[in-house]
Image (tube, rainbow, N blue to C red):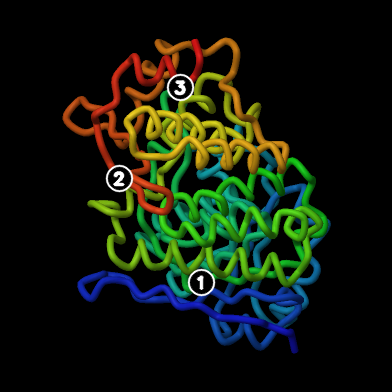
Amino acid sequence: MSSCQTTLHVALPPDSRDRGYPIHIGTDLLNDADLLTSLIGDRPVMVVTNEIVAPLYLDALRRALGRDRPVTELLLPDGEQHKTLDSLATIMTAALRGHHERRSVFVALGGGVVGDMTGFAAACYQRGVDFLQVPTTLLAQVDSSVGGKTGVNHSLGKNMIGAFHQPLGVIIDINTLRSLPQREFAAGMAEVIKYGLIYDAPFFQWIIDAGDSLASRDPEALIYAIERSCAIKADVVSADEREGGVRAILNFGHTFGHAIEHVQGYGNWLHGEAVACGMLIAARISESKGNLETAAVAALEQLLQRFQLPVEAPPDMDVDSFLRAMSLDKKVAHGQIRYVLLSTLGRAVITSDVGRDDIEAAIGR
């Protein structure tokens, strides 16, 4: 039996076609057969993971699933550059060859790329099967595994092809963070920081105060950071499951960040690195409009540097580079780019009132 410290619940709108689900956060959860059974029963399973994660955690998951359960395992290449329709087809082929039916459960074991693709495959396979998120990176644990956004990238834009498909549940075993490379851990911290900026100013201050504990991956600090991040995202998703309104505030830093990823090539900048830089650009624009204090922008920049996250846009990207890439973003409405800015620390707003000069000043070129 595991030592699960906390469980949250994502409550979806009453008219949702899906239902709410639990987020289990703790240590040693990958070895908890009872927890897995409580979520998926005795149904057949299709495990999707990648070649980096499989040697670390697939055996533990396999043991927890039990010997009597039909299980198909698929190992994909690692990296954002493989988040494509071709990889989606590979998942579908494996499911068909494994004779999976609608009662099967797809299990995503890995980071955000694995989770997004597995969820999208589950949404499409036989017009929809259940899936379970088992995120193994900090970024996936606090962001992509919660909320039901699934999809793949296209050469013309990030996450342009996908579906909303909520998981059966999320199992977050913080023991998986022990093996996470420093750069990947830092990328996840960018999303943790985001939640404080857009929703909870005291949480942002807590992150600053707990910076050393978080950097050393202290379990108690990590569990609180993950729990609070997931709780904030659950609140937002519960109010707006399909991003018709307030859920767009979760894209703080992402409009600029996705542009960086697109121009630099997926995988060259990690998603969290691009978001970190995008958040600072958005914060500088918020400051220039008189909504955010200079001290808050400075605190954000120092915090990002504390985790070795980038604070300057790529040197080969000027205003035109950003505008071209952002014009392809799926959040464009009626030909206008929608930006998420801060009206104050802990409160985000959605606006199209950002001009070329604003961006030029924020990126310093």
Q: Residue at x 71, y 43 (%)?
A: 307
Of the residues under marks 2 and 3, which one precedes in the sequence?
2
The crowd level at tag 2 (other Cα within 10 Å; few <14, some 14-19, many 20+) is: some
Mark 3 sits on what residue?
A: 362
Residue 111: x, y in percent?
63, 52
Mark 2 sits on what residue?
A: 349
Q: Which structural element holds mark 2?
A: strand
Mark 1 sits on what residue?
A: 104
Query: In the displayed structure, does residue 104 sit left or right of residue 178?
Result: left
- Rendered image: mark on residue 300: none
Instruction: Between label 2 and label 1, give the one nearer the viewer.
Output: 2
State whether residue 89 appears in this view.
Answer: yes
Q: Which structural element holds mark 3?
A: helix
Q: Residue at x 28, y 60 (%)?
A: 240
Query: In the displayed structure, does residue 342 sit left or right of residue 212?
Result: left
Q: Identify the amino acid type marked 1.
A: Ser
State whether residue 84 appears in this view.
Answer: no
The answer to whether 317 is drawn above or below residue 265 in the figure is: above
Seen as rendered, the residue at the extreme left is 334
Q: Which structural element holds mark 1?
A: loop
Residues at marks 3 and 1, CA–CA distance in whole angstroms: 49 Å
Asked whether the residues under the numbered discs 2 and 3 touch, taking CB atoms below 8 Å apart as contact, a structural biologist would say: no
Of the residues under marks 3 and 1, which one precedes in the sequence?
1
